[in-house]
């Protein structure tokens, strides 16, 4: 390695380790759910028994015999012998203390369309829907596939399934008919739940047509489709014939209005739900989550990481169709007896201050969103925030690494420089947060996920699986070295794929010793000298530039320092000399025109912040970036464009035309 490269390595390391820290406010620390730093040692010294503290946060029908049975790795069992019901723990047990407290405050596309659902209301609705599910033949252990948007019908249906012991499989409402059909087939569902329509940017969309098409595409013989209606009358484009498998939920509810369904006592290891996540190849993976371990983990992390209290008004602005919504809109907050805000439409409808308008109206205490949303708010500008009077105590980011610049904007303009921020790293597969600071205990560091949650043992390994020395700032593969209660049980119906996807690469798969099994996260990360973990993103979001392993986050953070840039993504382009070089795709702030000056500013920012070795090969100004419907940037597609490869699968994109337009622009078509 040349002296120049060594110098730039040192400069890069210095930039990444000398970032500013922010102390949590004293008044926050004084009221926090956990302010004892001894919690980390307690969980490490008493692993796995310390996780009993999590399970004791809710009511069990029968106490567990053993906290963790790890005799058959990686098929770990948590709280074996215990029995409970998730629906009961989210609803029934709160009725004596807070029957008239709001469980959900829902707001529709129209600012005047609002609904407050108390815990008593939720109890009545869930019982009626549970009885209706039984009327159409749903039995314990049947998997019910749901394809519902952000309407109260969604959490009600999920909790109704849980009440009768039927695992639910919610498919994000924005997914295509083919995606729905694939998931129906994989889950083997006889019953599907959907709705006639919902609103997007004020337009009333025909949602049933996707289910119609999915039923034709699916190999499964779906016997019944329960159809919720968005209004009192069906969507004007929706029809139901006598030959259809559709049954109106309203008709069933009329017969079950006062029904009472005893919650089915489920074994702790019985599945609660499936959540499908895309694989790099092949069909989607049905991550199967258990009842006892999952519920205990999301309840505890909602309490200790999100600092949720029953008296709070909490808003996770995710979609319940993703794991964040399952864990931190439905199960965790409801198990704690808090009030959650739900919103049907997009953040910019009917204006770009809609989120902050609602935050003021409902006096939201805790706000939970994604880095993608923060960058969008940045692009719009602080003026859309300034007109509203809200005061968050706590804010969360989730979904992907957040650049320090976006973090600082979030802290200043949304948090008013007095809210605690936690950045969280976790996955569909993990069930809940694994790496994030407990907010009252650790300083906040922009761009860093923080330390491991109590009882969690992450590590960084090289490509051979050899552990890198702790806290040295070297990049590698993020792994988790011991099991935790919220982890997935298996890939539904495919134990071998479960082993292949998550364990085989870094484990001795022939061993019966749990210590020989290591969970592969699939993300790159750095364990910095201060003990904090910095997530680089998916391993295909890490590039090797002239021998330097760089996460796209680092490059994008440098670009984000350019005031004219609203959002940027970096893709690796193959280079004969350097191996790979970065291409920058930049979206400019409103009112800014692309120019050579802005181009030069971007190049200079990368050179100044990282080094000349990381100089972008190209800077492409674009109107938008390819994003999934959950808001994640699909850098893989940009990499296809940079390398003039065929575009991969675009079916999960919010707007499939975006990468095609960028490709045409790059090619000069």
Image (cartoon, helix red, strand yellow):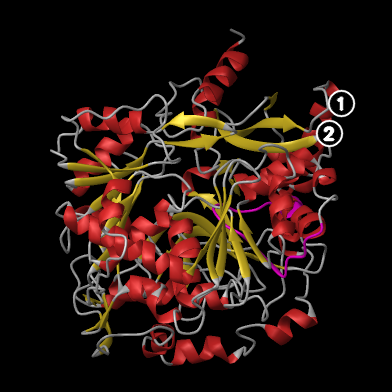
Q: In this view, does 302 lie to the left or right of 161?
A: right
Helix, strand or loop under label 2: helix
In the rendering, which numbered label is found on residue 597? 1
The residue stretch that appears in magenta: 389-405
**Quadrant of the rendered structure where residue 139 is?**
bottom left
401 vs 319, nearest the viewer? 319
Residue at (43, 83) in percent of width and height: 54
Left or right of 249, for residue 434: right
Q: Is residue 504 left or right of 542 when viewed as pictured?
A: left
Q: What's the distance in space between the residues labelled 2 and 1, CA to CA?
A: 6 Å
Q: Would you say residue 503 is visible in this rendering?
A: no
Do labels 2 and 1 touch, CB within 8 Å?
A: yes
* Quadrant including the C terminus: top right
Q: Can residue 382 be seen in this view?
A: yes
As for residue 391 lying within the magenta part, the answer is yes
Please, what is the dominant secondary structure of the magenta stretch? loop
Residue found at the far top of this picture: 669
Q: Which percent across, then down, holds residue 505? A: 31, 57
For image coordinates 73% across by 51% down, the residue present is 357
Give coordinates of residue 436: x percent, y percent. Answer: 58, 69
Q: Does the magenta stretch include residue 168?
A: no
| Residue 102 image offset from top left, x and y in percent | 55, 68
Q: Name the residue under label 2.
A: 601
Q: SS for tag 1?
A: helix
């Amino acid at each position: 390695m040349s002296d120049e490269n060594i110098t730039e390595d040192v400069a890069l390391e210095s930039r990444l380790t000398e970032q500013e820290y922010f102390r949590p406010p004293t008044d926050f620390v004084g009221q926090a759910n956990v302010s004892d730093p001894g919690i980390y040692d307690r969980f490490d010294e008493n692993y796995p028994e310390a996780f009993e503290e999590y399970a004791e946060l809710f009511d069990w029908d029968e106490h567990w015999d053993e906290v963790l049975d790890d005799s058959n790795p990686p098929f770990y069992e948590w709280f074996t012998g215990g029995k409970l019901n998730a629906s009961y723990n989210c609803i029934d047990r709160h009725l004596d203390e807070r029957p008239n407290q709001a469980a959900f405050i829902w707001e529709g596309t129209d600012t005047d369309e609002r609904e407050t659902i108390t815990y008593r209301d939720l109890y009545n609705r869930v019982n009626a829907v549970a009885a209706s599910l039984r009327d159409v033949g749903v039995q314990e252990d049947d998997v019910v596939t749901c394809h519902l948007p952000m309407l109260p019908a969604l959490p009600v249906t999920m909790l109704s399934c849980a009440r009768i012991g039927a695992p639910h499989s919610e498919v994000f409402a924005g997914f295509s008919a083919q995606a729905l059909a694939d998931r129906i087939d994989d889950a083997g569902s006889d019953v599907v739940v959907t709705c006639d329509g919902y609103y997007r940017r004020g337009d009333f969309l025909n949602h049933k047509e996707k289910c119609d098409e999915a039923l034709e595409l699916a190999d499964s013989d779906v016997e019944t489709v329960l159809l919720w209606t968005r209004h009192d009358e069906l969507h004007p484009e929706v029809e139901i014939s006598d030959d259809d498998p559709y049954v109106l939920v309203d008709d069933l509810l009329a017969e079950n209005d006062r029904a009472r369904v005893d919650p089915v006592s489920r074994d702790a290891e019985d599945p609660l739900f499936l959540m499908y996540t895309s694989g790099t190849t092949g069909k989607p993976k049905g991550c199967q989550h258990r009842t006892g371990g999952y519920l205990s983990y999301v309840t505890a992390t909602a309490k200790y990481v999100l600092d949720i209290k029953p008296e709070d008004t909490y808003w996770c602005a995710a979609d319940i169709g993703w794991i964040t919504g399952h864990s931190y809109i439905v199960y965790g907050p409801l198990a704690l007896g808090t009030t959650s805000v739900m919103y049907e439409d997009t953040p910019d409808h009917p204006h770009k201050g809609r989120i902050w308008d609602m935050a003021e109206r409902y006096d939201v205490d805790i706000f939970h969103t994604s880095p993608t949303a923060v960058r969008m708010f940045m692009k719009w500008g602080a003026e859309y925030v300034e007109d509203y009077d809200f005061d968050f105590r706590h804010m969360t980011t989730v979904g992907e690494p957040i650049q320090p610049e976006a973090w600082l904007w979030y802290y200043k303009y949304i948090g008013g420089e007095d809210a605690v921020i936690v950045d969280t790293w976790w996955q569909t597969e993990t069930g809940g947060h694994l790496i994030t600071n407990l907010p009252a205990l650790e300083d906040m560091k922009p761009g860093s996920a923080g330390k491991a949650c109590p009882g969690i043992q992450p590590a960084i390994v090289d490509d051979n699986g050899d552990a890198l020395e702790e806290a040295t700032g070297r990049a590698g593969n993020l792994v988790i070295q011991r099991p935790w209660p919220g982890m997935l049980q298996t890939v539904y119906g495919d134990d071998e794929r479960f082993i292949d996807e998550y364990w085989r690469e870094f484990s001795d798969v022939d061993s019966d010793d749990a210590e020989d099994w290591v969970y592969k996260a699939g993300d790159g990360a750095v364990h910095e000298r201060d003990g904090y973990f910095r997530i680089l993103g998916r391993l295909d979001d890490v590039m090797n530039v002239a021998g330097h392993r760089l996460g796209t986050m680092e490059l994008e953070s440098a670009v984000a320092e350019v005031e004219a840039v609203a959002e940027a993504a970096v893709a690796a382009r193959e280079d004969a000399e350097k191996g790979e070089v970065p291409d920058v795709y930049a979206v400019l702030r409103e009112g800014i025109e692309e120019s050579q000056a802005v181009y030069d500013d971007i190049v200079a920012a990368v050179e100044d912040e990282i080094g000349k070795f990381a100089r972008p090969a190209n800077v492409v100004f674009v109107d938008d970036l390819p994003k999934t419907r959950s808001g994640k940037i699909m850098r893989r597609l940009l990499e296809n464009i940079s390398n003039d490869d065929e575009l991969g699968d675009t079916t999960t994109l919010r707007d499939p035309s975006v990468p095609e337009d960028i490709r045409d622009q790059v090619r000069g078509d």
